[in-house]
């Protein structure tokens, strides 16, 4: 792409919209609609110097003060600030290389932008001036590029940044303009400076003059401006004074019919060989050239049209191959031609010479009729309420008013008969104009009701050539063109007279030559022979279709023989017998209270002019689509007029304006937007996004806002977004907003996923992804937790060692106490028992009264010795297993029961080698067993005692049963035995249950937990 002087470039245009689909009509400058982007929309400066769309989908605009990256909604402005690396603020060129680097030429040096890191990298040049003016970088293949400064021409090897220097033209001291270098695909290196064009021979470093004005060719006024190479390798040269030239056989030939002043051009070769050229230059800054006809048209600014060219000098042009969109850079901002959004071409009705005398009508000068000339399809008859009738010659883009012959300028409807006669419904009259003779004929006095301002509101020619006239008060009339006579048609029940208004709204004829007339008295159908008419009542709907609902109604019979009628807030479809087959209301998508007109396109879709948007109904899918001012319409509410031309185009009337379009070209936008996360803001702090790297958020900043966009330049404000934060969101969030905020997220790694849909609801299958890592606070980090676990483990181990030491010391104390009791108390009690036995033997028979006392002493010593042995057994640590308890219980039970001849049985369900008991548990379990067994042996008079012991789920169950006499707890005297048992059970967190009845024995059950 070649920069213009200064900063202009040439690009190839794509877009089917540049090929006219209209039979016999060439594209015209008036067919273009421009949307505008200026500093009021965020540009850093209105003087545009260069443009580029990068591979990600961002638009870049170089200006006289700053570099702008545009995402369809807003501009991100880059300016030299000493930190970002941008070489200068005046941007002279933008080029993207094969690796995605964007090379930025400025008035203060060369740099390149890396999209991944969003940083500029300065490119050092061996110029004496360390901040030289640099021309646009021009690619030659994938690895090389050319540019120049005031001192040198450079060929740079892009991967290594190595440069080769070539001499510049002229004297370096007097040179003030940088050369613009253009390498073409044939290997030629072109150079432009001061309006002259040269070829550079890289082998010798010499220049060959071709054309233009320089110091040795002062006699020519031709100034070379820019070069462009089309897809076929053809070179186009834009010049001042000579217009456009093409390179033919080693020299340039002028292109006939172009403006003498051309700065740049966009060329498209249409199927069939026709080419259209959009060029910068001319009187108004922009022109259209049609090579087939050799005709050039200027784009002019229309003060009444917001979509017209801004009349500013064009500095650069850019065509988007993907969308067919054209971007026009001017000295007053950006202009955009968008075929995916602006579907409707625009015609403004020019004022009449006597406009001042018609100020009464003002804003009410609505287009009321648009009729294509049957004899010349390029001509259209246009009627305006209050301003008269004019002819629009589409091919010549000319307008001519009928200044004479009309009965009144208040035009309601226009019809051209098959014979070519023009019938005009004016206020109070019907006018006929004969194009051949240029003569007028008028009818005025054919109404019935006097004192009324009558109007013909609808005109129709039937298959027989009769002209039918619908009036605003007196019903229907028919004109015989041969005789010139007008007669009234009377409908069933119609009555005439003052106060008996009978208005005709719409008329149409079906394929059976029957005439349908929609009136204030209902819908009527006239037979083909025109001998009678009958009212057609719509049936099959729940609510009555009352005449009061027939205000501003529409009537249409489509190609499938469906009858379409509208009333307040509804559109009804019926068959030709009046049976309603479908009703469309707001529920079905109708966004209007009144439908004014209905027209069918060649694909069977219905277009409806309404009081709220232009509607399109597709009967096949039963769906509506809506079109507004932002699609190029002159207003959101249109007039009653919608007409189809022989080309298939539809024409819609507005106030002093007309929109027209080819419905087949109105297609959904097929280009899905590219999703991009543009910004991460943590609090008020901006966080850089680097491609392939996670965004890291500190623990105290776990609230953040993501900004994103879908790169779509066709109504991007209507994009739809769907996002999800993996690790937090469970489902997608769909929104039209462009931000998402998250707060109080747990530390961890999250993935933000983004999908986008364009203005027509097409979703992009590709997602944008951004990894977000929230750093945990130190107390939630792995190292801290590991350290904490180690500290706790160390502490626990210390506590364990301490308690283990304490336990061992206690065990040692218990062992010492047990040993002392056994050695000291045991020997003492044994001595008492022995001494008492000896004493009994010595006094046997001598002191009989002392014998019982000595026996008691011996028995007490024996019992005390046994109790002491139990205590010693309890406190000894080596007896801490449940199995030890079972063994001692079995020994005691056998010893106690054998002396009395009682059977003893002990059932143990399992081994208890792994179960350990503390001192309290061993002591209380054993003493409960011992006390219960003593009671059974001494008092129950039992023959058998059964003891069962089981352990499961960390619970112990001990049951002692005897088959003795039993007892009734309610009648016996309570001693200390049972309360002591219950107390011991509570001490070990157990429960004791005593079950007994006279004659049924006794059952004592202990249940307790153990660890």
Image (cartoon, rainbow, N blue to C red):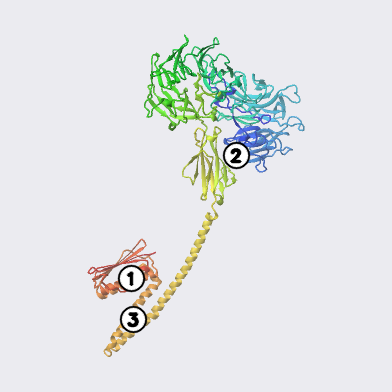
Residue of label 1: 981
**Dot 3: few (<14), some (14–19), or many (≥20) neighbours within 10 Å?**
many
Q: Is the residue 112 above or below the residue 420 in the image? A: below
The answer to which of 881 and 339 lies nearer the viewer is 339
Of badges 1 and 3, nearer the viewer stands 1
- Residue 468 seen: yes
Cα separation, mark 1 vs mark 3, equals: 25 Å
At which x and y percent is residue 57?
Answer: 57, 35
For the residues marked 1 and 2, what is the alpha-carbon distance in whole angstroms? 86 Å
- Residue of label 3: 861
The label nearer to you, 1 versus 2, is: 1
Query: Which numbered dot is residue 115?
Result: 2
Quadrant the C terminus occupies: bottom left
Instruction: Pick whichever of labels 3 and 2 is earlier in the sequence.
Output: 2
Residue at the farthest bottom position: 846
Foreground residue among 472 and 96: 472
Specify which label sits upstream in the sequence, 1 or 2: 2
């Amino acid at each position: 792409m070649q920069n213009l002087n200064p900063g202009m470039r040439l690009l190839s245009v794509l877009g089917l919209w540049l090929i006219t689909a209209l039979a016999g009509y060439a594209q015209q400058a008036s067919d273009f609609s421009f949307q505008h982007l200026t500093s009021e929309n965020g540009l850093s400066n209105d003087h545009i110097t260069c443009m580029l769309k990068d591979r990600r989908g961002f638009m870049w605009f170089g200006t006289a003060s700053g570099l702008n990256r545009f995402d369809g909604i807003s501009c991100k402005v880059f300016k030299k600030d000493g930190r970002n690396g941008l070489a200068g603020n005046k941007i002279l060129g933008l080029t993207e290389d094969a690796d995605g680097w964007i090379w930025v030429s400025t008035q203060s040096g060369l740099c390149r932008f890396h999209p991944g890191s969003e940083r500029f990298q300065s490119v050092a040049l061996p110029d004496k001036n360390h901040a030289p003016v640099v021309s646009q970088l021009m690619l030659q293949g994938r690895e090389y590029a050319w540019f120049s400064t005031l001192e040198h021409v450079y060929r740079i090897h892009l991967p290594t940044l190595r440069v080769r220097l070539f001499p510049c033209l002229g004297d370096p001291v007097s040179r003030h303009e940088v050369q613009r270098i253009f390498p073409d695909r044939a290997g030629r290196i072109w150079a432009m400076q001061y309006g002259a064009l040269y070829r550079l021979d890289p082998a010798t470093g010499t220049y060959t003059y071709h054309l233009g004005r320089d110091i040795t060719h002062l006699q020519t006024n031709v100034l070379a401006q820019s070069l462009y190479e089309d897809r076929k390798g053809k070179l186009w040269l834009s010049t001042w004074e000579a217009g456009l030239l093409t390179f033919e056989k080693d020299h340039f030939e002028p292109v006939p019919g172009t403006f003498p002043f051309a700065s740049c051009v966009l060329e498209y070769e249409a199927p069939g060989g026709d080419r259209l050229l959009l060029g910068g230059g001319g009187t108004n800054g922009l022109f259209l050239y049609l090579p087939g006809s050799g005709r050039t048209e200027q784009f002019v600014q229309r003060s009444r049209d917001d979509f017209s060219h801004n009349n500013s000098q064009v500095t650069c042009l850019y065509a988007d191959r993907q969308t067919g969109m054209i971007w026009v850079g001017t000295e007053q901002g950006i202009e955009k031609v968008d075929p995916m959004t602006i579907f409707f071409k625009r015609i403004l009705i020019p004022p009449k010479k006597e406009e001042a005398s018609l100020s009464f009508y003002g804003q009410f000068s609505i287009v009321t009729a648009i009729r294509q000339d049957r004899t010349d399809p390029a001509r259209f008859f246009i009627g305006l309420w209050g301003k008269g009738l004019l002819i629009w010659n589409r091919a010549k883009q000319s307008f001519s008013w009928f200044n004479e012959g009309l009965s009144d300028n208040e035009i309601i409807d226009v019809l051209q008969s098959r014979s070519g006669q023009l019938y005009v419904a004016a206020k109070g009259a019907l006018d006929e104009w004969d194009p051949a003779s240029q003569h007028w004929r008028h009818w005025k006095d054919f109404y019935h009701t006097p004192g009324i301002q009558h109007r013909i509101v609808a005109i129709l020619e039937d298959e027989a050539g009769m002209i039918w006239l619908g009036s605003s008060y007196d019903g229907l009339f028919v004109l015989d063109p041969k005789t010139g006579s007008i007669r009234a048609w009377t409908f069933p029940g119609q009555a005439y007279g003052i106060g008996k208004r009978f208005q005709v709204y719409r008329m149409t004829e079906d394929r059976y030559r029957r005439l349908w007339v929609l009136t204030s008295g209902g819908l009527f159908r006239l037979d083909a022979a025109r001998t009678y008419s009958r009212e057609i009542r719509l049936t099959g709907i729940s609510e009555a279709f009352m005449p009061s609902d027939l205000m501003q109604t529409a009537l249409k019979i489509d190609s499938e023989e469906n009858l379409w009628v509208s009333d307040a807030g509804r559109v009804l479809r019926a068959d030709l017998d009046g049976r309603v087959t479908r009703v469309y209301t707001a529920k079905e998508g109708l966004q209007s209270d009144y439908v004014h007109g209905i027209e069918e396109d060649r694909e069977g879709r219905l277009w409806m002019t309404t009081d709220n948007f232009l509607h399109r109904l597709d009967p096949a899918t039963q769906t509506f689509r809506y079109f507004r001012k932002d699609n190029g319409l002159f207003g959101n509410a249109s007039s009653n007029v919608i007409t189809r031309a022989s080309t298939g185009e539809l024409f819609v009337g507005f106030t002093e304006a007309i929109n027209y379009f080819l419905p087949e070209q109105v297609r959904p936008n097929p280009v899905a937007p590219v999703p991009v996360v543009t910004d991460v803001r943590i609090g008020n702090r901006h966080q850089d996004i680097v491609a392939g790297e996670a965004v890291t958020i500190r623990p105290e900043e776990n609230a953040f806002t993501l900004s994103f966009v879908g790169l779509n330049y066709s109504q991007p404000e209507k994009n739809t977004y769907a996002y999800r934060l993996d690790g937090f969101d469970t489902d997608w969030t769909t929104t039209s907003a462009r931000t998402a905020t998250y707060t109080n997220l747990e530390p961890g790694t999250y993935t933000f996923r983004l999908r986008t849909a364009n203005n027509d609801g097409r979703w992009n299958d590709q997602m944008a992804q951004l990894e977000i890592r929230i750093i945990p606070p130190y107390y939630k980090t792995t190292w801290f937790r590991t350290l904490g676990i180690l500290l706790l483990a160390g502490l626990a181990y210390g506590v364990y060692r301490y308690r283990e030491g304490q336990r061992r010391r206690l065990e040692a104390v218990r062992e010492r106490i047990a040993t002392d009791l056994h050695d000291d108390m045991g020997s003492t009690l044994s001595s008492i028992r022995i001494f008492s036995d000896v004493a009994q033997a010595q006094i046997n028979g001598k002191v009989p009264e002392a014998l019982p006392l000595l026996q008691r002493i011996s028995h007490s010593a024996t019992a005390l010795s046994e109790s002491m042995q139990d205590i010693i057994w309890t406190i000894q640590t080596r007896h801490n297993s449940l199995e030890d308890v079972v063994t001692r219980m079995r020994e005691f039970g056998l010893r106690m029961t054998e002396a009395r001849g009682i059977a003893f049985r002990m059932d143990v369900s399992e081994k208890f080698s792994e179960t350990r008991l503390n001192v309290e548990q061993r002591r209380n379990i054993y003493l409960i067993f011992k006390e219960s067994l003593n009671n059974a042996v001494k008092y129950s008079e039992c023959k058998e005692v059964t003891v069962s012991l089981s352990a499961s789920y960390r619970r112990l169950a001990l049951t002692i049963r005897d088959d003795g006499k039993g007892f009734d707890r309610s009648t016996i005297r309570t001693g200390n035995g049972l309360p002591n048992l219950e107390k011991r059970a509570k001490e070990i967190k157990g429960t004791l249950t005593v079950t007994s009845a006279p004659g049924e024995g006794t059952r004592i059950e202990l249940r307790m937990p153990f660890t």
